[in-house]
Amino acid sequence: MLDIRQIRDNLDDVQTRLSLRGEYDLASILELYEQQRSLDTQCSELQARSNSIGKEVGQKIKGGSDPKGTDVQALR
């Protein structure tokens, strides 16, 4: 199994070697890898936002705000 970094860093060399075994579309593999990286980044950003909102809700409730009040509900 090839490491994606090896494919990305040595695309021409890997393509040449794999062509001896058959037809492989490395461009689509790299495109899917970039999509995965983008989605991972988005997921991390959303998780961080969720954590931040959770902390704010906790602080408001701890500060005496009504958990069902509009200021807490607006954060959710």
Image (cartoon, grey):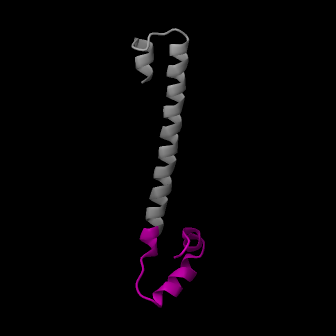
**In front: 14, or 1?**
1
Residue occupying the far front of the picture: 62
Q: Is residue 41 above or below residue 9?
A: above
In the image, residue 64 lies at what x, y percent? 52, 8
x, y percent for residue 33? 48, 62
Looking at the rendering, which quadrant does residue 52 occupy?
top right
Residue 5 belongs to the span the image colors magenta: yes
Quadrant hosting residue 66: top left
Residue at the image point whose x is 46% and y is 57% from the top = 36
Give how far across and how far down residue 65 sits, in percent: 48, 10
Residue at far bottom of view: 20
Question: Which residue is rendered at x = 44% and y = 17% of the image?
Answer: 72
Q: Which residues are magenta?
A: 1-29
Q: Compared with residue 24, is residue 53 higher up or lower down, i.e. above or below?
A: above
Work out whether residue 66 or residue 42 is closer to the camera in this orientation and state it.
66
- Whether residue 35 appears in magenta in the rendering, the answer is no
